[in-house]
Amino acid sequence: MKKITFFLAMVGILAIACQSEKATTPKQPIQYPTTQKVDHVDTYHGVEVPDPYRWLEDDRSEETGEWVKAQNDVTFGYLKNIPFKADLQSRIEKLNDYEKISAPFKEGAYEYFYKNDGLQDHSIVYRTKIDEVDGTPEVFLNPNEFSADGTTALRGIIFTKDGTLSAHMITEGGSDWRKAIIMDVASKKVLEDTLVDIKFSGISWKGNEGFYYSSYDKPKAGSALSGKTQHHKLYYHKLGTPQSSDQLVFGGAKQPNRYIGGFMTNDQKYLVVSAAQNTSGNRLYIKDLSKPNSDFVLFQEDYLATANYTDNVGSKFYLYTNIGAPNYRLVSVDFNKPTQENWKDVIPESENVLRVNTGGGKFFANYLVDAKTAIKQFDRSGKLEREVSLPGIGSAGGFGAKDEAKDLYYSFTSFTYPSTIFKYDIASGASTLYKKSNAKFNPEDYETKQIFYTSKDGTKVPMFITHKKGIKMDGKNPTYMYAYGGFNISLTPRFSATRIAWLEQGGIYAQPNLRGGGEYGEKWHLAGTKMNKQNVFDDFIAAGEYLIDNKYTSSDYLAIAGGSNGGLLVGATMAQRPDLAKVALPAVGVMDMLRYHTFTAGAGWAADYGTAEDSPEMFEYLRAYSPVHALKAGVSYPATMVTTADHDDRVVPSHSFKFAAQLQESHAGDNPVMIRIQTNAGHGSVSTKQRMELAADMYAFVWENMGITPEFKEEVLN
């Protein structure tokens, strides 16, 4: 049996729209495809567990392909017949049809920026010469030309320190496997053959001679997405040589690690390697490349703790760590005395979670205060210079630049504040508007509040609630509740143009910050892992109950949603509380908790989840909430649209396939329970077109099953 794994990256948030009630008429029962069951049983600690849909794990088989087509025929047939879907699609397109420009960044002789005219599938990379005043921007890379259908996308550009060479990575069909293309920047000429089969990797140049990258041994051609990837490897590629001769620098069977990243320090003297067994924690190694044949120096050896390179001045290194500081701190240490007793606080731990960026020779401390951003500027000695004044309560990103920079750029956004770019003068601390969003949105029509509700065990949990001003709290407001709750990932306030379609129709958007995330540091994270995972589901259920008890909505008007680990959250919640919500939208979810660690790189999730092999107690705990196993026959479940994609090689689609098959078998009610399988997409949509189509289908499904018809005025559609 082929096996599968996944590496989670934080997944994008979708949210939706609603308004007037409509009379419902009886509909013909949906005829779901018949899903074959096989007589397959696994034994865990002496306990036999049937797995009747095991055959769906072979996602490249002819039988699975036929099943996918049959399921999609039912789902897309249902969606096509929703009468307002065409108007909804038009509205979403109009809301997203505005110019989007990134902050500029300087590399060598050029200043670069990304721009999307509105509905382009991908943003184009433009540049201007720095020494040309008011120079006309020229196209440097246009990802819209990479493929005819828009499913090949750019995944980052990395320049040499002098900016004369670049390497850009692309994904095809949303896969996590990447290709790297090397170019001469001035001429835009491709220099050599494309490098292939790169996965979970950055690129770090060593001068202009070559670069470091990471990957696994790729499964053999023809293998299913479930083909297992095991030992990560750090390679050095010398320009002008074939990829087959690339040097193995770290990892592989001799240094087995699931995730390895390597990069050069800014002074090009040291190679830093982070090696991890799980998605949390790492060992940290640093090598002095100025000394031939020198060994790596181990700075941090505890796989369950985190220590990451932030900066260095000569042999003085600055590390960002949670060792002795669950909310993180910044320390300094000399390369020649790396042991922890020599670590000195530069920015000590505080009551708020810390992240650190560098720019202009300064440290910018990004603090998470109840899931909202606060920024402070420090010098290299750790002296506080100022707190940066932000436009409001929300999320700020950026605050990174080269050491010689005099200014930098940052973005600011919130639920009712479209992403806006500011230029920041490092010496004075003055911020000036650089680029205002052209989103068609009037923030004065809406409001956001943050409340704290009580979970099952008495823990106070924060939740953001956004809606139109003046709506009536009568329990009938359609509400879309989205959450994640895992892997130390924090959900912070973000603007979504698509979400306007939900809000302008009178809908409520709710975003609770569940345990398992990183909003309150490592303690908050660990409170939602392994044998504490039920806390995450309890927090989510309590959030829904708060919204119902306080008349924001009711069970008939509540939709619950989440992606990846959040898809697991939705699947487990609907199994435990099928009465909580009217609609459930589990996206690209981890649904088989007994086998997740056997898929692609999924063993790296064990620090958060535990595995069925760990102990009889861990096995029973996982089986109790595993969505595939927790569904019960004869129960009426919420209207459910499971979403996944055929090229998802993080959370492989068989998770969703097996869950959908089990749900259709178990479900006893009239609510539709179906699966939407996107083609040429991965762990998230690849193109603007795909994202808008998916959003329209999800929103339409929610409204239709709440018995609501959105009212689109003619002026907003034209």
Image: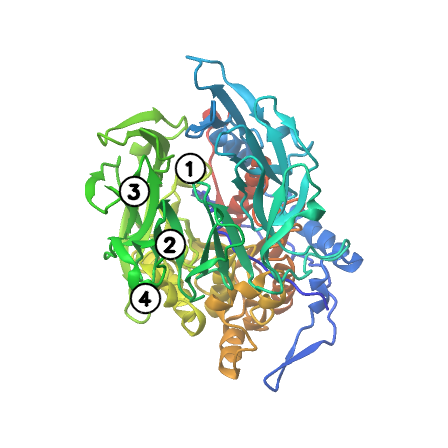
Residue highlighted by disc 2: 335
Q: CA distance from mark 1 to mark 2?
A: 51 Å
The residue beneath circle 1 is 500
Q: Nearer the viewer, residue 334 or 693?
A: 334
The residue under the point 41% across, 28% down is: 440
Amino acid bearing label 2: Phe
- Observer-nearest of 461 and 183: 183
Question: Does the residue at mark 3 contact the one at mark 4 (Cβ under 8 Å)?
Answer: no
Residue 84 visible to the viewer: no
Identify the mark nearer the N-term, 2 or 3: 2
Give the x, y percent position of residue 509.
38, 47
Q: Residues within 10 Å of mark 3 (few under 14, many from 20)?
A: many
Marks 2/3: CA–CA distance: 23 Å
28 sits left or right of 493 in the view: right
Comparing labels 1 and 2, the label whose residue is closer to the camera: 2
Instruction: From the image, tell me which residue sits under label 4.
Output: 455
- Circle 4 sits in a helix, a strand or a loop, which is it? loop
Give how far across and how far down residue 260 sits, in percent.
Answer: 53, 56
Against 67, residue 364 (above or below) is: above
Lower sequence index among marks 4 and 2:
2
Label 4 Cα crowd, 10 Å radius (few <14 / some 14-19 / many 20+): many
- Dot 2 falls on a residue whose secondary structure is loop
Q: Residue 364, labelled with which disc?
A: 3
Near mark 2 (Cα within 10 A), the count class, few <14, some 14-19 or many ≥20, is some
Q: Amino acid at mark 3?
A: Phe
Earlier in the chain: of badge 3 and badge 4, it is 3
Gap in angstroms between the C-alphas marked 4 and 2: 46 Å
